[in-house]
Amino acid sequence: MIELYDIHKSFNGLEVLNSLTLAIQSGETMLILGRSGCGKSVLLKIILRLIAQDTGRIIIDGENTTDYSEDQMLHVRKKIGMLFQGAALFDSMTVAQNLAYPLIEHTECPFSEISTRVDEILHFVEMDGTQFKLPSELSGGMKKRVALARAMIMKPKYIFYDEPTTGLDPITANTINDLIIRTQEEYNVTSIIVTHDLASAFRVGNRFSFIHEGKILCTGTKNEIINNELKPIQNFLRDALWKTI
Ligand SMILES: Nc1ncnc2c1ncn2[C@@H]1O[C@H](COP(=O)(O)OP(=O)(O)OP(=O)(O)O)[C@@H](O)[C@H]1O
Ligand SMILES: [Mg+2]
């Protein structure tokens, strides 16, 4: 379980998160919704401590990581796979090198096991045979698949997806959604997905939180979000619907 209490974060006087409180239960897929610039990516980075919050408490599996140093965060980060907005693969490395990198950096895995794990995870994301390709040779959807494979290679307990389908055509987006669902089912991971792609969100999520003015305005099921009468939520839903028509 991941618990966030009263998180505040400003950048140069611009308040992004303002007393954000949220709990992500083990086993669920939490969808974070909100307009561009509302702080969704910042929130994920704060949980990973890639960005430090100004104030507020973070508890991961009962462990208070609020003031953890880089060293103390290492074992916590191993539990979390992250698919960054825009895939963020290493351009000069092959697909296999991109996937092997976390294992080489963080484990004592022998070469034969690394190679087997790379092949297995590539098979899972339906990218067999691409080991020696460079990211520049892959389509946008294929890059997302490799990024998901890299996020999963350490067999994390949690996986964070930042805009996994944004910028993809609807058919490719759906293949990524199917893969996200399969990842949840086969690896039993707890997921946080950040997106403004509402169609994808409703397909893959089981609980939804809406960020507005730095706070969680509403958390609930798909129906609870759709039926929430607060104006920022209704306006967001209407705009999102308009964009997907
Ligand atoms: N490292 C940083 N330094 C300064 N400002 C930042 C930094 N990271 C984010 N911000 C600012 O914080 C705000 C929230 O950014 P964030 O990337 O979390 O938005 P988002 O909700 O993910 O938006 P999008 O949906 O467009 O990805 C923005 O105004 C952004 O400019
Ligand atoms: Mg973002």
Image (cartoon, helix red, strand yellow):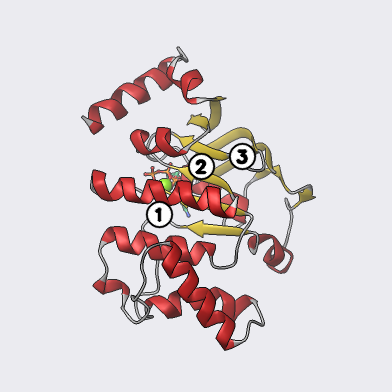
Extreme-bottom residue of the structure = 111
Report if the CB atoms under discs 1 and 2 are less than 8 Å apart: no
Mark 1 vs mark 2: which is more N-terminal?
A: 2
x, y percentage for residue 222?
47, 25
Q: Residue at x 63, y 76 (%)?
A: 106
x, y percentage for residue 209?
52, 31
Count of marks, rendered view: 3
Residue at which label 3 appears:
8
**Residue 39 visible in image:** yes
Residue at which label 2 appears:
13
Q: Residue at x 55, y 59 (%)?
A: 81
On screen, residue 245 above or below 30: above
Question: Label 2, label 3: how many angstroms apart (C-alpha)?
Answer: 12 Å
Q: Amino acid at mark 3?
A: His
Numbered tag placed on residue 85 in the rendering = 1
Q: Nearer the viewer, mark 1 or mark 2?
A: 1
On screen, residue 90 above or below 61: below
Report if the CB atoms under discs 2 and 3 are less than 8 Å apart: no
Q: Secondary structure at mark 1?
A: loop
Neighbour class for label 3 at 10 Å: few (<14), some, many (≥20)?
many
Neighbour class for label 1 at 10 Å: few (<14), some, many (≥20)?
some
Extreme-left residue of the structure = 245
**Residue 43 visible in image:** no
Q: Secondary structure at mark 3?
A: strand
Question: Label 1, label 2: how many angstroms apart (C-alpha)?
Answer: 25 Å
